[in-house]
Image (spheres, rainbow, N blue to C red):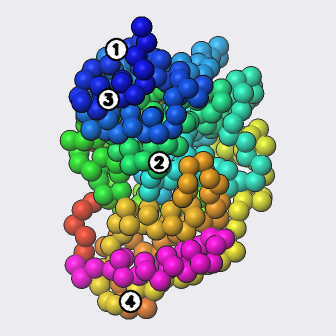
Amino acid sequence: MRTDTATLIDHKARGGHLDPDTIDELVAGYVDGRVTDPQMAAFAMAVRWHGLDTGELAALCGAMSASGDSFRWNIDAPVVDKHSTGGVGDKVSIVLAPLLAAAGCAVPMLSGRGLGHTGGTLDKLEAIPGYRSALDADELARILADVGTFIAGAGASIAPADAKLYALRDHTGTVASPHLIAASIMSKKLAGGADTLVIDVRWGRGAFCRTLDDATLLAELMGGLAAAADVAYDAALSAHHSPLGRAIGNACEIREALDVLDGAGPTDTRTHTLALAERICGLAGVDADLGALLDDGSARDRFDAMVAAHSGNLAGLARPRHRVEVAAPRDGHATLDALVLGRAAWHTGAGRDVPRAAVDPAAGIVLHVDDGDTVTAGDILCTVEGSDDARVNDVAAHLGDQLVADAPDTTTDAQTTWWSAT
Ligand code: URA
């Protein structure tokens, strides 16, 4: 006999174990509407409190992955992929996917939207007018064969359970659960059909994992799921106390990604992207000079081709109607806290107030100083931009004070270590 939904949630909320059939039924019911958003939110909170054991995690990830199409690519190239657990200013995927395509890999990338204070690759790409991120399996296969990469979203046909639960978690305080993050990411990645996968597990002030220990646990959880699916897997454990690069938001992050694709851009964005790409190539046995592929325009060509294949018009990239510069209110040191800046960017309109709402493609913050820089009262720290004057003014009015400290910040993001199963 089937367990009714309220009873199984109550069982999990008391710390009980759920069997795979029950989890399958829950996920299927959520996708077809028999299980409601409030019920799924209660389940997610029970998981946030009690976690999942290995069998439950495998069942949740498997059910979410199997809720839509799963790909097996018949393609004569190493099929590789990368995902981040969420960061502020993290535009790495936008550079890395075309870079790896230029190196001869096939990169079927299923990405996410903004979650909590972190930005989402799809929201950023959709700042390019016309960019379609919800494509059917045939179109994705065609783009992968023609261009070597696509960046699309979970949705009606791919991991729909993740698309629904992801949007719900964003508004129910259930994002920062390692088990829900692992199931969410791996359900998309396994459906995407890559043979080689690197996950950028971020930890620190701007990440969902606050400590290196939390990040290690998350890397291990996903490593177990990858091993069971026979996918070659490594995880970067990347410190993330300050934003990556200088742009935080939607269109402004696309602009920074274009700079990196043109061989320029902030050093940390380029360096981190290359480190992840080199690890993927190493795992997949691909020998390529990745820096040269950025510098000689090859990666940029792939990006332009990918955007065109997704029907995007790069020339029309969203531009902010309203811009306000934020000056240092006093002498001191720039302190670029990723959580403060991620929340501020979200408030400009770069993130959503209500589930599934539209974001402002032009919203974001562009930094003009680096973490720890000495600043003098009146120096311009950043520009806040977007389409909503009131939001932009409000963020700009409060940000200056939060970005200057008396002493330099001693935390550093220059520490990526690696988690590997072998
Ligand atoms: N990225 C995802 O796809 N899911 C999460 O839960 C967090 C980051």
Residue 170 got which mark? 2
Q: In this view, does 159 lie above or below 92?
A: above
Q: Name the residue under label 4.
A: 329
Q: Find residue 393 and report its horizontal and vertical position in percent.
A: 55, 81
Residue 395 located within the stretch drawn in magenta: yes
Q: In this view, does 237 lie above or below 255?
A: above
Mark nearer the N terminus (4 vs 1) = 1
Looking at the rendering, which quadrant does residue 249 occupy? bottom right
Question: Mark 4 to mark 1: distance in Å?
Answer: 57 Å
Residues at circles 4 and 1 in contact by the CB criterion of under 8 Å = no
Q: Name the residue under label 1.
A: 19
Q: Which residue lies furthest to the top in this view?
A: 1
Tell me if residue 236 can be seen. Answer: no
Question: Mark 3 to mark 4: distance in Å?
Answer: 51 Å
- State the extent of the magenta-drawn residues as a range: 379-407
Q: In this view, does 142 lie above or below 83?
A: above
Mark nearer the N terminus (2 vs 3) = 3
Q: Decide: few, some or many residues near mark 3? Use Cα within 10 Å; few <14, some 14-19, many ≥20.
A: some
Mark nearer the N terminus (2 vs 4) = 2
Q: Mark 3 points at which residue?
A: 10
Q: Nearer the viewer, mark 4 or mark 1?
A: 1
Question: Mark 2 to mark 4: distance in Å?
Answer: 33 Å
Mark nearer the N terminus (3 vs 4) = 3
Question: Mark 2 to mark 3: distance in Å?
Answer: 22 Å
Q: Find residue 276 and report its horizontal and vertical position in percent.
A: 43, 40
Q: Which amino acid does label 2 sit on?
A: Asp
Q: Dot 1 lies on which element? A: loop
For the point 46% across and 23% down, which residue is it? 26
Question: Mark 1 to mark 3: distance in Å?
Answer: 14 Å
Q: Nearer the viewer, mark 2 or mark 3?
A: 3
Question: Mark 2 to mark 1: distance in Å?
Answer: 26 Å
Depth order, front residue of 9/410: 9
